[in-house]
Image: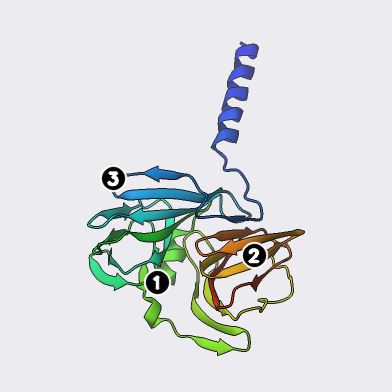
Amino acid sequence: MMKYLLYVICFLACLDIMAQETPLVSNVHNWISAPVVKSNFGTSINLFNGSGKILSKHSLNGITIKPGKKIIYKERGEGDELFFIVKTGPIESQLNGVSKILDKGSVVFVLPGDEIIFKNLRKEEVELYEMRMYASQPNREQGISAGDSFMMDWYDMEYRPHDRGGVRQLFDRKTIMTNRFDIHITSLNPGISSHPPHTHTNEEIILMIDGEGEMVLGDKRQRIITGDAAWVESMIPHNITNKAKRPAVYFAIQWN
């Protein structure tokens, strides 16, 4: 009997280990080299999938929708928080029954239990980034009290120029899965670095929507181009330098 119980305990422990997500490490993930999976609406790729310091599950996918096709998301109330960025548009977006046409750079934030539908009305394919977030101890009351799900069009974002380029501060709020979800979009002039390599406690995603740069990630230097996303671990020295002759535009996403 004791031997049997040991086998059961070991088996359950193995299942628990298998269920855990692999910790994410600092790296640039490339859109063009990710394996493509076909679907009835188009294709999808996975840029990264794993766990972080705060979130027990964090993934970023690239979604391509064929002309005339649509994709529907409706997570259960205990499911993932979803965040979308329009990579190429415009695209019709219907959030809880309210429709809006969103162009490149626009974003959608969806609380668990809400519904978002993306429909491609164009004659060409459109592309989205799909981010999924889940915490081991979600705080639903905190997230709901902080605000509803929302859509934000690129042309409604205030642009503030500065000496290195400019910035669009999208939002900084609590969510069900995070105590703080902070996103801004930086425009970086040619040949300019975002800042000297620095560190911070928050993990971060740098997502290049237009341009070509070089990411410093600890002791590594990696190329980052349109479509790519860099995962930055907590307290890892990092920065980005624009290597092209036009402005580089990228999302900087942090949470804690």
Whether residues under marks 3 and 2 lie with C-beta atoms below 8 angstroms apart, the answer is no
Q: Given the image, on which type of amino acid does mark 3 rest?
A: Asn
Marks 3 and 2 sit apart, C-alpha to C-alpha, by 37 Å
- The colour mode here is rainbow
Q: Residues within 10 Å of mark 1 (few under 14, many from 20)?
A: many
Q: Which callout, 2 or 1, points to the residue nearer the camera?
A: 1
Q: Which residue is mark 2?
A: 202
Kindly state the secondary structure of the residue where label 2 is placed: loop
Q: Given the image, on which type of amino acid does mark 1 rest?
A: Ser
- Is 195 situated left or right of 77 in this image? right
Q: Which residue is mark 1?
A: 106
- Determine the residue positioned at 43% across, 53% down: 80
Looking at this rendering, what residue extends furthest in the top direction? 1
Kindly state the secondary structure of the residue where label 3 is placed: loop
Q: Given the image, on which type of amino acid does mark 2 rest?
A: Asn
Marks 1 and 3 sit apart, C-alpha to C-alpha, by 24 Å
Residue 114, percent from left and from top: 32, 59
Looking at this rendering, what residue extends furthest in the right direction? 219
Quadrant the C terminus occupies: bottom right
